[in-house]
Image (cartoon, rainbow, N blue to C red):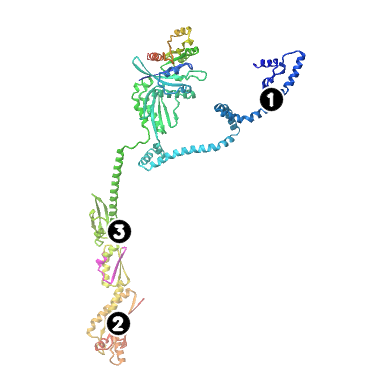
Amino acid sequence: MLQKKICMLGSFAVGKTSLVRRFVESIYSDVYQTTVGVKVDKKNVQVNGTDLTLVLWDIYGEDDYQKMHWTYLRGASGYLLVADGTRKATIDKAFSLEQRVREEVGVIPFVFVINKCDLSQDWEVDSALQAQLTEKNWNLLRSSAKTGEGVEEAFALLTRKILG
Amino acid sequence: MGSTPKHSREPLEFRPKPPDASASGSAPEPEEPPREGDDVQAYRELRELILAPEQEAIERLHQRVDNPASRTEDVGSVVAEAIQLRRRQGGDEDLSSALSPTIETALRESVRKDPGTLADALFPVMGPAIRRSILETLRAFLESFNQVLDQSLSMKGLKWRIEALRTGRSFTEVALLHSLIFRVEQVFLIHKKTGLSLGHAVAPSVAMQDPSLVSGMLSAIQDFVRDSFHTVQGQGLNRMNVGDLDVWIEEGPYAILACVIRGVAPRTLRDRMAEVLENIHRDYSEQLDHFAGDSAPFAKVNSELGRCLELRYKEEAQPRGFGFVYATAAILSLVVAGWLAWHTMQYRRWERLVNAFREQPGFVITSFGRQGGHFVVRGLHDPLAADPEKIISASDVKRADGEFHWGGYYALDDPIVQQRAISLLSPPPTVTLAVKNGVLQVSGAARAAWVKELQAKAQLVPGIRSLQLSPELDPERLAFSQAKSEIEITLVKFPLASASLLPSEQGALHRLAEEAQALLKAADALHENVTFEVLGHTDSTGPEVSNQNLSQRRAERVVQELSQLGVPERSLSPRGVGTSEPLRREDSEANRQYNRCVNIHITSVTH
């Protein structure tokens, strides 16, 4: 059985936990995130006929009260970078997190997800951002933890990237 | 700020405020709007008339509110009731959270000032709590100790004692180790860098957790501890404990081994974990180094992990087969013990018999032992000693169980030597023989000839080293007394009224001379001076005077004759006693003839 460690990164309250909650096997309470700073969940996927276990490290989003434990990223095969479409600051934070990951553990596959697409009327995503993303050559996925839209696709895309 | 316009409007309408509207009453006077001269005066008077009592009351209230002392007094009088009211209204939580910082600070301050006060207050609470805790601990300890005691006398206890001797540890340590009730429930092998699960072993009937998740979280917690406390590289969390559940973690360069243990595990488990982790690093070093999520190369690692599960001392019921083996062993050992006891008893009986022979004079035991289930006794036997068969039949051994081989010999035991001396020397019944330490002691009455023979033969008797005669058996003394009695019973007869020797008396005279010489020889050896008193006798016929004379001549005649036969004359003393000392009463002719004689009486004096 192939296993891969992947991390969930993003600002506080962008919906990382909600994003995975409906799609993963979990035995730990969310309390771990605020205490230990991470919660480990699991997701079995099948990509191109390969069974794969994704071990998800849902890392607490850095905020004014708690720093991120960067050591949690060690050994990760890839990550989901999550932002909140209704808060532009979280998108900027995602850019800086991506840069920080490169510095800490090097270049590893990731998928950028802008969450809360069910609230797209409130999105602060503008054309400038689109241009920025195009410049960076980032794939943008829109997802909604509420409706489940884009979640499976995000994991499938990340897995394909990891498997190369 | 919002109340100011309200104050300014009131006087305009000339509407006096009700007395309880104290807030507006405190409004300052300068706020009055300007009026024309008279009106102002009138207004002021009117106002004083109407509002004076209220203003005084307001003034008193002012003072009361502004004076902290009176305010304190007011609050103090209702604070307890206020708290009670609040609690009744159900605002406990708010009240507690409002009060707790103050109470905490107060407690801290009290401890800082004088810890004794709080300690005294808590004393009645802490004592029982501590005692209960100690009691609980002791009870648990005693329970396990009792278990150890129960087992210390059993077969198991014996095994532990042997183990203690073998390993050099104390018995208590070994017993406690075996009495510990613990179980390794799960073993996780975690890739150190990724936190991914490499292997997982689980004890039977244990609720299993998803190894991927547990491995990840354990690894995260390790990282968390290391990050939070800035530990040195290579050092991390190696033990977690919740209730009776323990998680022991052993860390290697590439992998982490974690055991979930229920109960109290011994240190040996830690050694076992280190050993297992080392083996895995040895066997999978390449795969661990290049691990990219594929756990297939580690498929066989679970059997190695299983070694951690094996180590558990919670004793399980013994398989039934062992019970049978123990029972057979017990019966066999009983049989062997019985046979040994019987065998030992037999041997003791024969040993007692052999010892009896050893103590018996005339026996020497040269060997004793078993040959082919038979007892064999070899030894020497003096023919004069007791009959061995009688001794055997008097003992408690079975004659058929053994055989005896006797050789002959001369025993040197006194009783046997004494018997031998009696049979060889044939002493007269008047003589007593006794042997003591090889010395033959002879006493009683015996003839000189026998004594002579005894002296010649005694030393030839085996076991007799020397001869000791009692004084009366001294040969000189014996010869002396023998010659004396021979001389004193011999008479020299004379014819009627004559002192001439009859030819028939020559024999008697020669015998006397011979015995006298022998006696003198013995007397010489015995240092005795001997006098032969030669007494002449007559019968009672004829006148006394002539009888006296005749008897004197008869005595002298015998002295003369003995002297001629070699007896020294100085030792011979003739004396005629006439009829004064008749040898027989003269009531017949024969007796009268008997009295016409000479006899000899011997006296001796030691010089």
- Disc 3 target residue: B359
> Which amino acid lies under the numbered mark 2 shown in the image of this protein?
Ile
Crowdedness near tag 2: few (<14), some (14–19) or many (≥20) residues, C-alpha within 10 Å: many
Q: Is residue B211 left or right of residue A69?
A: left
- Disc 2 target residue: B600
Q: Give me the C-alpha separation between circle 3 and circle 2.
A: 60 Å
Of the pair B490 and B111, the residue shown nearer to us: B111
- Whichever of callouts 3 and 2 sits on the residue coming sooner in the sequence is 3
Of the pair B593 and B519, the residue shown nearer to us: B593
The quarter of the rendered structure image containing the N terminus of chain B is top right
> Which amino acid lies under the numbered mark 3 shown in the image of this protein?
Glu
Q: Is residue B421 magenta?
A: yes
Q: Give me the C-alpha separation between circle 1 and circle 2.
A: 181 Å
Return the residue found at the far right: B38
The magenta segment is B420-437
Crowdedness near tag 1: few (<14), some (14–19) or many (≥20) residues, C-alpha within 10 Å: few
**Residue B65 x %, y %:** 67, 25
Of the pair B520 and B181, the residue shown nearer to us: B181
Which quarter of the figure has residue B542? bottom left
- Disc 1 target residue: B61
Secondary structure, mark 3, is helix
Residue drawn 26% across and 53% down? B367
